[in-house]
Amino acid sequence: MTKDLTTRTELGAFLRGKRTRALRADHDLPPAGRGRTTGLRREEIAVLSGVSVTWYTWLEQGRDINPSRQVVDAIALQLRLTEAEHDYVLGLAGFAPNPRPALSEPAAVPAHVQHLLDTLDPAPSFALTPHWDIAAWNPAYQDLFPGVADADPTQRNLLVFIFTDPRVRDLLPDWERTSRRFLAEYRTETGARRGGTAHVRLLTHLRSASEDFARAWDENAVQRFASSRREFTHPRHGDVAYEQVNLLPQDAPELRVISYLPITRAGGR
């Protein structure tokens, strides 16, 4: 037996074992035949991972096929693999393990986008990448949002802040509802990028960093963005409220500018 065939067989056996032992409730799936609560069907994992049932079956059978890294990442995400398990299947598929830290530093924004943010001051405003990295902001946003300027650039992500920074949790008076709304909007926006490396890394990182995130993500809620009232309880300014609006720069389509237009302020600046 060749080494390549051996590794393909090991990869197929490992994926098959994880699939058959998975809890269906963790994937929001009802019990299967005769009330079985464990084990996912091949077609269920295939659909969730964005591949055909035939192709996924061949992968588990150790056939001579070459999955892309993006496909391996997508399957690892759907099977809820740990970082160690994810690296293991990447190695069997011929890829290097994911680099650590899990997240990467967002690229600098164009000068004209930063100029727009500064012009919007004193309305707190910031620029988001497609994966919700906070790439730039103005002084009013830095004043409102704790730690955005001092954060490790690889961790300067809106979802990371919401689910891992206790100061942001204290900033949101209804954290449970607000965090889930943010997450539902993120899921809706990133549906087309499911399985992409940056998306997988972010979800893997947050799953290991926050049990609240893991539970909320598994609810599979989706919600389109709509301009709405955003409320904060600031440690120095008290209760403040804004209307959130989104701006899409025509000459920087990969970015989204979010601005909080003041409605009321208690305590003033």
Image (spheres, grey):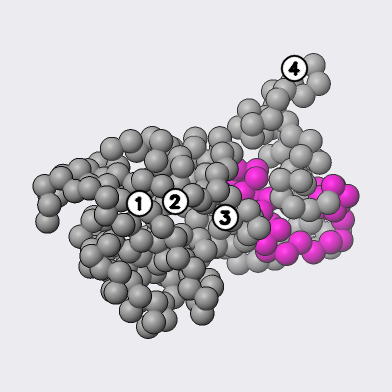
Judge by depth and name the residue closer to the eye, 255 or 105. Answer: 255
Q: CA distance from mark 2 to mark 4?
A: 43 Å
Label of residue 189 in the image: 3
**Which quarter of the picture shows residue 239?**
top left
Q: Which label sits in the foreground, 3 or 1?
A: 1
Whichever of labels 2 and 3 marks the residue nearer the N terminus, that label is 3
For the point 58% across and 50% down, which residue is it? 188
The answer to whether marks 2 and 1 mark residues whose Cβ atoms lie closer than 8 Å is yes
Judge by depth and name the residue closer to the eye, 222 or 95. Answer: 222
Q: Is residue 120 left or right of residue 49?
A: left
Residue to which mark 4 is pinned? 35
Q: For residue 72: magenta?
A: yes
Q: Is residue 226 left or right of residue 16?
A: left
Q: Is residue 59 left or right of residue 222?
A: right
Judge by depth and name the residue closer to the eye, 205 or 2. Answer: 205
| Three-letter amino acid code at the position of disc 4 | Gly
Q: For residue 43: magenta?
A: no
Asked whether residue 109 is in view, the answer is yes
Secondary-structure class at tag 1? strand
The answer to whether marks 2 and 4 mark residues whose Cβ atoms lie closer than 8 Å is no
Residue to which mark 2 is pinned? 227
| Three-letter amino acid code at the position of disc 2 | Ser
Q: CA distance from mark 2 to mark 3?
A: 15 Å
| Three-letter amino acid code at the position of disc 1 | Glu
Relative image position of residue 47 (x, y in whole percent): 76, 46
Secondary structure mainly formed by the magenta segment = helix
Q: Is residue 32 above or below residue 268?
A: above
Q: Is residue 221 above or below residue 146?
A: above
Residue span colored magenta: 53-81
